[in-house]
Amino acid sequence: MSKDNKHTEENNALMANGHKASPKEKDSFISFIYNKREGTFLGRNGKSWVQIIVFYIIYYIFLGAFWLGCLAIFLSTIDKNLPRYYGKGTIIGANPGVGYQPWLKNNPESTLIKFNINDNTTYADYVGVLENYTMKYENETTTKLTKLCSGSESNSDIVKDGKLKEEGLKPCRFKLDVFKASGCSLENDFGFPDGKPCVILSLNRLIDWKPEDFADDVIPKEIAKRYKKGSIGFNCDGTYGPDKEYIGKIEYIPEAGIDGRFYPYAKMDNYHQPIAMVKFHNLPRNRVVLVECRAYAGNIEQDIETRQGLVHFELLVEDYEVSTPKTNGS
Amino acid sequence: MSEKKKKREENLDELKKEITITEHEVPIEELYKSLDTNPEKGLDEQEASRRLVEYGPNQLTPPKNKPLWFKFIISLFEGFNILMWIGSVACFINFIIVAKRTAETVDYDTMWLGIILAAVVLITSIFTFYQERKSQHVMESFKKMIPPKVTVVRSQKMQQIDAVDLVIGDIVYLVFGDKVPADVRVIEANGFKVDNSSLTGENVAVRRTPEFTHKNPLETSNLVFFGTSVVEGNALGIVILTGDNTVMGRIAGLTSLVETNQTPIAKEIKHFIKMIGTVAISLGLLFLAISLYTKYKSGTLGEEWIDCIVFFIGIIVANVPEGILPTITVCLTLTAKRMSKKNCLVKNLEAVETLGSTSTICSDKTGTLTQNRMTVAHLWVNGKIFDSEVISEQPRNDSTERLLRCAALCSRAKFKNEDWNTPDSKRETIGDASEVAIMKFVNKQLQPVNVHELRERCRKINEIPFNSNEKYSVTIHRKENGQFLLLMKGAPERILHRCSTISIDGQTARINELVKDGYNVAYEYLGGRGERVLGFCEMELDPVKFPPNFKFDTDEPNFPLENLCFLGLISMIDPPRPGVPEAVRLCQSAGIQVVMVTGDHPITAKAIARQVNIIGQPKVVHLISLETDELNLKQNEIKAIVVHGEWLNKLEESELDFIVHHYDQVVFARTSPAQKLKIVEAYQRAGRIVAVTGDGVNDAPALRKADIGIAMGITGTEVSKQAADMVLLDDNFASIVTGVEEGRLIFDNLKKSIAYTLTSNIPELAPFLTYITLGIPLPMSIRAILCIDLGTDILPAISFAYEPAESDIMDRPPRNPKRDRLVNWRLLFYSYLLIGVFQAIVGFSLYFWIMAEHGFPSYTLLNLKDVWEKRDLLVPDKYNRYWNYQDRMNLLGVCHGAFFYAIVCVQWADLLISKTRMNSIVTQGLENNVLNISLLFTTLLSTFFLFTPGVNSILKVGPIKLRWAMLPVLGMWQVFAFDEIRRAVIRKYPDGVVFHTTYY
């Protein structure tokens, strides 16, 4: 009997060992990240981690070096003055988009031009933007790098296959005189105080693009009266029916739009981006007008979906007395 | 809730105890009284219907099946699905946060991602559910749907009723061929024998009489049990227990109480989720900290902290490998299909892999390892032992003929019909297994005469049936010449005792010591082989003393029963199935221990165990049974043991654990169902993954407790099939080996598949990280990511299910569930940091190149994203061209397309390198045609995505130029070559740094 007991005890001890071991290996999340007993972090000990880190450092150095080298070789094949892809069939395409100014960089989401004619603080920002934008055309240092073009002179003379024919050739200078003459200059704060704001319209710069003329019989009726061959015509109108009613008289400066002699564009030091302006003469007061301006040339297509060849913005001219803050209780 | 659980445990403990019934002990009159019935009248109808209401119908309540929709809902939240749901919910949160902040234009991509994640879960769950239902249906086709009838005495009339309507106190009449309809105490019996194998697993017909012989209800002579079958005679009995209260019902009830373990693959997936979760959250937190810091520095933390949260969630979502769930599901399904072709029907998809991890198989003997068909194995005649297979080639003499004649005539077994053309093995028979075996054997040996003709010639005049006291049976026949022939068969020692002469070589000789020695050697030899031995003898009765009109009286024998002539011995065994010994060997070489658990006698069990290689031939076997009370466990050199069931009952749990730990070759004999459960638990405690085979109702609890329960398709009871995870359609143990092989293969292949799928996670995640930290326009969109994860990556990942093994998977031990994980850190490191980063670099190179070619060199891209994404802003490039929003998005679409293509391309290489973990692709070959086709498929699909008008605009990926396509091809070759070198290094230095850092 006693002999039996002894065996049992022995066995119990034997078993107990096996038993104790198993609950300890409980797969708890903490011990899985850091196992104190075995000194392992995420299942590896210190030496193993060092090995692995060294291995990966070497691996990444080789890998990185190889691919950076590859990339450097690829990039060196790209001309710094001529993009690999431009014109028809590329993503940027050969159909320019239209841009407008003033457009506030600190509120880029908004395309609303809103001001109170009685409060100069409400339009100071717009005037500032326009001033900035037009300044480069009259800047002494930059105008030196351009030349006055007349007659048949144009940028085509200095650009070939999307590139300047040679370094140092000067592009045509764009003059602002015509805008000043029509009351769109800093002198009258671009017409904002009178509620007759001027808005700049321009085309996206596309390499190797220049306007093509409309054949005589297909000139769109919107610009037929003002159209001049070699130019890009503009026409603005209300976006929807009511806007069209309220928009009032629009003056285009110059009448024919942008002169085609400033095209084509190529990467150069001092390209003068040609612009046109529209002046809204009798906008309604305290009412938003949605405006759509379209550019017209033989090779511009307008597409509302992709916003090619046109631009949308909103105008709100307010007219109410600015009440100077008064103390209550008087 | 906890109380409920406690109660459940109590119930379980109670059920684990042996059955206690007392109805068989009380005198029969008392029982009539207490049950208010008597054998002549029976119950009256009203009382019967009252009791039917009180005790319920006489049938086993099927385990409470949860409604289908409930099961489905549960399955929606299991395993990998959880990760997907978290991802999905995170997407919606992100979407709502972003949508609330930006009023004008809302990017619906995150919302769609959330919807798609949820959809993937739904679709794969439906798929899994459908598959499992399908195998369920296959099983249901096994059901034999004939409602059994039973003859009862009610209201003084004998009548047939449905067995379901039987109640306690009913008087039932049982004849051979019936299934016992309830637990019944025998009142009257005529040569009544039952086969208790469905309860005990022991396939022997046992006699049942009205006498109370044993306290143990299973041993006593006067009880028969629900579900067993009557093989001989008839009896009248009184129902003492019905339905779930029967012994069988309690076992079935035990089954539903046993809690099942999580499958190994489910554990692996849980572990995998944990790892992915760790990576996702730590990456998320890291970048949350970075973005918070930069916002803090730029002083915009106040307004924009919510952006950081959005990024944080975004990173977590980006870590969810969308494709893994469908991949795993489909891989398992494909393997399940393949297995069912090889006769392993898998009920539960996850169980497919379980067999592969199995380290211990507890196998039934009867029907699984053996054929469940008693067969004559040997004859001892003319002083020699003959194998039954070769006896017909031996020269016959008169002695042999007499033995065969005796065996043919002294028998109650019969063929059911007279169709002598069908082979014997297929004919239906009546009688107990031994007699049938002998009859079939003799019938073959007697050709051209058959048993029936011989019996016609020598008509049976009278007989003394077998009884357990005398252990013999006698028949008296009249030969054609009118002479009487007395034949006797029975326990060899009793038969020999009654003989004075022996027939050898056609001569009759006196039995002397020499003959007795020869007999003893033969008897011990046959008995030692686990064979059931019967002795035969005869006497030609003197026609003078016994004239043709002599009346034989069997109650008071008026004829000699001694000084007979001994003819020989015939031994029978239920032989091993062909192929089983080899299969067991194969299991052992695969490191799987095969343990026999049987209700049979230890000697028989041991003999069969030796024959099927469970016990190695040369080894000494430690036999512990009641006789060897002393457990001498210190004999370490002995690794084989046969444990007797009654002895097992006395064992402490720790002692059983010792047996389980110490012995390699174990046979449990004479085990009860409760013990089977105990044995399984002991092996599970030892950290084994246990497979259990079984067919009887008694096996159901163990089947359920096992990591994988394997039921028998042909002989298995419905209850056992319900409890099992897998069904062997051909009942053959050898099929299990196929299952093991498939299970191991799928584990390896899932590993490869996951390594492949996870890799593309990095090139998908990295663009988002650079977008956040460097502010470059997003190089890779959610749509393109989904195109990879749920498009081009899916078929290749699935094709791994068809990948042949790298080396002989049956030559290595089963995986250690604690160490050999499905996904480990090495795999994650390898996939993410080695190949994944490689892929990301290729993708980024292409992105920067394309951007540069369009006028945006890398340095101009830094922190460009805010401006880039403004719809009404024009962005100047290096050439001072102005890009409007649409053009920018088109350019980005091309970049996304290119990045997508780059990943597809390097995933090509990844697919090829993931085929092997160690070998070179040259050794492995390209024989996996599904994988080869999947390569073609990804190519076509990516082309379809990129270049089909309409499709590419929906996916927002632009068509790419051939010149760009060349760069990822370079990367592809590099990945391929790099990994071939890496594996070559691993093969060269199997314990080197490269192995330790990169071998998964």
Image: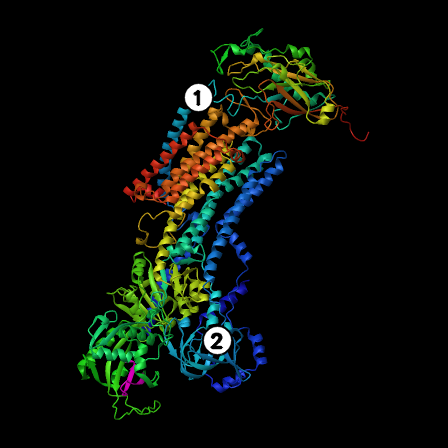
**Is residue B484 located in the magenta-colored stretch of the structure?**
yes
Of residues B478 and B116, which is closer to you in this image? B478
**Residue at the far top in the pictured view:** A151
Chain of the residue under label 2: B
B995 displayed left or right of B523: right
Q: Position of residue B977 (x, y in %)?
A: 33, 36
Q: Nearer the viewer, mark 1 or mark 2?
A: 2
Q: Is residue B533 above or below residue B67?
A: below
Three-letter code for the amino acid on which mark 2 is drawn: Ala
Chain of the residue under label 1: A
Of residues A47 and B340, which is closer to you in this image? B340
Q: Is residue A161 above or below residue B826?
A: above
Three-letter code for the amino acid on which mark 1 is drawn: Ile
Q: Is residue B47 visible?
A: yes
Q: Residue at x 23, y 76 (%)?
A: B380
A258 displayed left or right of B817: right
B843 displayed left or right of A264: left
Query: Do the CB atoms of the residues marked 1 and 2 lie less than 8 Å apart?
Result: no
Of residues B525 and B357, which is closer to you in this image? B525
Q: Which residue is mark 1?
A: A78
Q: How many marks?
A: 2
**Is residue B443 located in the magenta-colored stretch of the structure?**
no
Local secondary structure at mark 2: loop
Count residues near mark 2 (Cα–Cα under 10 Å), then give few for <14, some for 14-19, many for 20+: many
Name the image quarter holding residue B705. Answer: bottom left
Local secondary structure at mark 1: loop
Of residues B682 and B795, which is closer to you in this image? B795
Q: Which residues are magenta?
A: B473-492
What label sits on residue B182 in the rendered view? 2
Q: CA distance from mark 1 to mark 2?
A: 92 Å
